[in-house]
Image (tube, rainbow, N blue to C red):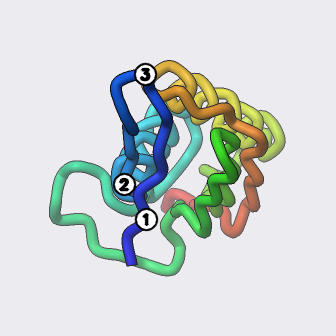
Amino acid sequence: MKTDHSEQDTLGAIRYNDEVIKTMVNMAMAEVEGVAGIESRSTGNILSRKSDSHINKISIDGKNLTVDLAIVVKYGLSLREVAQNVQRKVQEKIEAMTDLIVNAINVTVTALEIEE
């Protein structure tokens, strides 16, 4: 079930569908050097694999947003640095494009991508 998250404006409510939030998060992750295999890139023909970076959960309480992500990082890079860059990029994109306040972006590094 798709959830609409809303803001109250003087003229009425403004709502964000989960898919809109997911698109913004995926776009932000795609901008971070070292994140591999992003599920749902706009190419349309990415095969879904368990080793893809993806969104586990989106929670909104009022205007406070929490996102749980799983990422795959390219081997040889600092896992902590890549995860922190993802947190910053997601926060920047969400807060620039909506009236939501990013409360937390929880990142789990689930795998390493090793180039052959």
Report whether 67 appears left or right of 12. right
Q: Name the amino acid, label 1.
A: Thr
Tell me the SS state at disc 1: loop
Report whether 111 appears left or right of 34. right
Cβ–Cβ under 8 Å for marks 1 and 2: yes
For the residue pair 116 and 13, the one nearer the viewer reads as 13
- The residue sitting at 43% across, 22% down in the picture is 10
- Residue 110 lies, with reference to residue 34, above or below; the image says below
- The residue sitting at 22% across, 49% down in the picture is 42
Q: Quadrant of residue 70?
A: bottom right
For the residue pair 20 and 114, the one nearer the viewer reads as 20
Q: Which residue is mark 2?
A: 17
**Pointer 1 or 2: first along the chain:** 1
User: Which mark is nearer the camera, 2 or 3?
Assistant: 3
Q: Where residue 35 sits: x, y (%)?
A: 55, 46
Query: Pointer 1: residues within 10 angstroms few (<14), some, or many (20+)?
Result: few
Q: Which mark is residue 3?
A: 1
Q: Name the amino acid, label 3.
A: Thr
Cβ–Cβ under 8 Å for marks 2 and 3: no
Q: Where residue 110 sits: x, y (%)?
A: 70, 68
Cβ–Cβ under 8 Å for marks 1 and 3: no
Tell me the SS state at disc 2: strand
- The residue sitting at 17% across, 65% down in the picture is 45
Q: Which residue is mark 3?
A: 10
